[in-house]
Each structure stands twice: as structure tokens, then as C-alpha cells.
Amino acid sequence: MSWFQRKDKGIHTPTADKKELPDGLWFKTPSGKIIHMRELKNNAYVCPDDDYHVRIGSEEYFEILFDDNKFTELDTHLSSADPLKFKDTKEYPRRIKESQDKSGLKDAVRSAYGKINGEDIVIACMDFKFIGGSMGSVVGEKLARAIDHALQNKKPLMIISKSGGARMMEAGFSLMQMAKTSAKLALLSEAKVPYISLLTDPTTGGVTASYAMLGDFNIAEPGALIGFAGPRVIRETIGKDLPKGFQSSEFVLEHGFLDFIVDRRNLKNKVHTLIKMLK
Amino acid sequence: MHLEFEKPIVALEEKLAAMQDLAHTSNVDVSDAIKKLEDKIKDLKKETFNNLTRWQRVQLSRHPERPYALDYIYEITDDFIELHGDRTVKDDKAMIGGFGTVSGQTFMFIGQQKGRNTKQRQMRNFGMPNPEGYRKALRLMKMAEKFNKPIVTLIDTPGAFPGLEAEERGQGEAIARNLKEMFGLTVPVICIIIGEGASGGALGIAIGDRVLMMENTWYSVISPESCSSILWRSWDYKEQAAEALKLTAKDMLANQMIDGIITEPLGGAHVNLKEAARTLKETILKEYKSLSKLKVDKLKSERIDKFCKMGVVTE
């Protein structure tokens, strides 16, 4: 008997019977480790071999943080306008529409309230896949309303930042969202409602220079890029290569701007412990 | 120095000078011609400066002879005492501040400062503050609050400095803190864009009860050049970027992001510092007069409400 079953040359399996390997079933980390997606998901999207924190969005964070993935989303209907009739190589409304279709999101932030190990919490989480997580009027307004919700109901607030900064296509309006979110956070602070700011990869520009750095607790995931100016701009300004680890979470912690770095697998319990301590 | 769009005016002015010379040195009566030419220059100036493109305004805001913060401060105050340092790291020379009196009223003046020549420009870091600059500004604002003196900030920066040490010392945190703290100030705050208002570096001292722009200035989230390089992937689209960003005083007022515009002498503030400073002084005194009547709670809540209204979304 031959080793091989196949007697005829060529592949004769009808297309309908072919087994497909779904896309994205495996994930390769930057250090080259390969992991099955199911395993990754069960591990809070952290690669068990090298602790690499995969970039995830609001859907995954809500699932990791809210008890039984149960939450009530706020202001789901808010969407971007085009007050400046902005046009670069593309018209802004078209850019928005394309991003919405591609990502299934309305804009770069989602906010919701629910429970974390039984404790009330309001969480707003940015989505990098929507125009680089850029902050425009929608992000500013949704955050402002989420802060209002936390303020009115005296529930702790957590904002998960993941953004390249302000959205250029809304020009001055984007800039003013830094002011608006800071104003609301000033009120929240006055009312002594705790605010935890989680900085994830990447958090830069106007987001760093406003709500991301205004937490009672500024915390970050390991290995995230955190800074005001982007590394490319700094390299061009000083005309030198940047030191290894520059603008990483660890670097920012070392320089005194973070309270601690938290592994995503411990995030829920750590946030819960912190909230309970403050009660 | 003259900008490209000023050249036709300059040409006529040269012609006028030659004619006046002629009138002096010869007996020919050219007074009629001179009068005509003067009127023509005046008309052309009005025509030119009333129809500037957005990019031309940006150019005027960066004019090498444009008055800087200290020029205005020395011009409008009777006494001015400059104060230095953030009490933590150093004295940031790109951010200046101090108490000054204007018509008997003491104000805390704070502003970004640019340099006039190469040496000064380096010393002032081209008007780009480091974190200690924003912390110095906040220290001075808190002091103004302590002694119950109103605050005037003069904004003129191409941006917060994007350097290595700036990151190490927390540029983002320094600006963020200023935004939050300025909303809590119990004294009137008047913010005036006198030149360039670039992004977070400008906003870091621009949270106030009145935010005003001088006529030939710009204020936006990014400079036209950087916007061009990011969105068009080339430095050549700065004019289009300036148009798209709607960054002039008129645009910002129309979109309700500022409270008013301060007119400049025809040709720009640099043409007549005294006149520009006089208008600035009158505006500061007028705004302060109306703000000083408000109770602290109302002052603060109106400041917060104003900024919270900014932004356009569809529900």
C-alpha cells in the first residue's frame, strides 16, 4: 500500500468542499511570537510569551472591563459635521463616511456606564482605527457628556486614550475640544469624583496635552508610546536619533508623569481595587 | 522688509519719494501729481489689505518687524516689573511675565516672546516654550489670583517646543494642567492673539473670559505648513492648507471660537506700533471694565460654558 492516498495528479476537491483558514486566526507579535487568536482573546489580547499588548479598541476594552460585558452606551447617535467645509486631498465628509463604513464606528470614541466587579463606573474608550483616534468635535462632545454623566451620578470615570491627537480636518474646533474636556474635568475634580486616565499605545498630541494627563490617576499599559510631540517631529527638530525606549510608558513613569503601569490582564482588578479604596 | 503682495505699493511709494525729491530740487510744480499719487497709494493699500488671502495674513503675523509681547507691554504699561522662573527647573525665556500698571490698574501680563535677531531668537527659542514656560505662566497666574489682579495673556507662538527635554519634563502634562487650572481662576482673564496662535502651545495660556485676535494673526490646531506636509504629504500646499484651516481672526469669530477682533493700523501692526498698542490698551481696559463687574462664580461659569459650547456635531 502506498503512503499517499492520492493516485491521480492535481487537486480535484471541488471549491465548495475546500476548507478555508479564516483570516486573522493567528497573530504574530513584533518579537515574532505566533499565537492563536482564541488564546489571545482569552488572555486579554496580551501575548503570553512576551507580554506584548496588542492594540485593541472599545469593543474589546468594554468586554474586558464591564461585568459580563454588560453596559449601557451613551450618546451613540453623535456623528461628525463639517462646519469648515474642509477639503484636502479628500472631502472631510467622505473621509468620515469611509471610516464609518470600514470600522463600523460612528467616531473615535465610545462611552458607556456599567459595573466593574460590582462597582459603578463610566468608561469612555477611544478607537484608533477611526482616523487615527483623532479628537474632533464628536470626541470632545461625547467625552464632555460622559464626564457630565459621571458628575451627575457621582460615578468614577475612566477614559482610555488611544489617539494621534487633534483632528486636523476640524481645525480650530478640534483645538477647542482640549479646552472643553479640561473644563469638564475641572468640574469633576471640584466634585471630588475620581478620574482614572488610562494611556494606551499610542497617546500623543492634543490628547496627551489635555484629558489624558489630567487623571487623578494617570496609568498606562506597558510599552505604549506616550508623548506630546511625535517621535518623527522631535528627531527632525533636534537632528539626532532618539534614545531607546524614549516616550515609552516606562520612560514616562520614570520621569514622574504616571502613577503606575498596569498589565492588561490585571487591569480590571486593579481599577476595581482603586475605586473601592476611594469609597 | 516687504512681503510679495506689498511690492506694488512699495513701487508706488518709491515713485512718490522721487517726485517729492523733484519738487524740492526744482521749480516744477508737481503738487497735483503728488496728491494724486498719494490718493492712489492709499486706495491701493486699502484694497490690498482688505482683500488679503488667509496665507497672506499668516505671513503678516510672522513679519520680522511685527511687535512682540514685550514691545506691547512696554508701550502700554506705566510700570512693568518682569518676574522670572517656574521655581522648579529654570526660567523659560520663550515665556515672559510680570506685573504692569495700565491707567492705574495693575495687570499680570503673560506671553510668549520671540526674538528680533539671530542671537535673541535662539535665546527666546523662537517663541516655543518648554514645559517650564507653561509652569512659569501658571505660577504667575496663581500669584495674580492671590493678589486679586486681572490677567492678560499675549499669545504668539509657532507651537510648544517639540524637543527631547520637553518630553522628559512633561510638555503634555504642563499644557493640560494649565487648561484645567485656568478654568478655575477667580480673576478676569483676557487672552489676545498678537501673532501666531499654533495649537496646544498657544491654547496653554489662552483660556480666558475674553479671547481676542488682532486683525493679522492666525489661530488653529496646526500651522499651514505642517498641515500641508501631513495631509498633502508635501510642503507645497501651505496656501491651500491655510484656506482649509479657516485660521484667520474673521474665520474664528464667525465660528464663535473667539470673542472679538482688534483692528490694526493699515498695513499691519508693525507699520505703527504706537497706534497698534493704543488700540490694544483701550481694548484691554474696556474688556476689564465689563468683566470686573461680574461676581467670581459667574465669571468662572461663563468661562466654562463658553468653551463647552464650542464644536459642531450632528445628533
Image: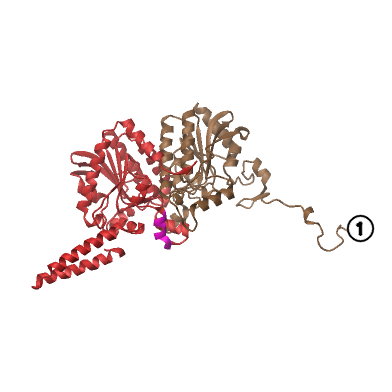
From the rendered image, report the letter of the chain displayed in red.
Answer: B
Compared to residue B244, the image places residue B153 above or below, namely above
- In reply to whether residue B93 is colored magenta, the answer given is no
Magenta segment main secondary structure: helix
The x, y position of residue B8, in whole percent, is 27, 67
Q: Which of B22 and B270 is in front in this view?
A: B22
The x, y position of residue A71, in whole percent, is 58, 34
Q: Which of B123 and B184 is in front in this view?
A: B184
The x, y position of residue A239, in whole percent, is 42, 59
Q: Quadrant of residue A209?
A: top left
Quadrant of the snapshot with the N terminus of chain B: bottom left
Classed neighbour count for the residue bearing mark 1: other residues with Cα under 10 Å, few (<14), some (14–19), many (≥20): few
Q: Quadrant of residue B77?
A: top left
| Residue at image coords 49%, 49% | A164
Instruction: Determine whether, in the image, residue A244 is placed left or right of residue B163.
Output: right
Compared to residue A194, the image places residue A55 above or below, namely below
Q: What stretch is highlighted in magenta?
A: B235-244
The x, y position of residue B229, in whole percent, is 45, 59
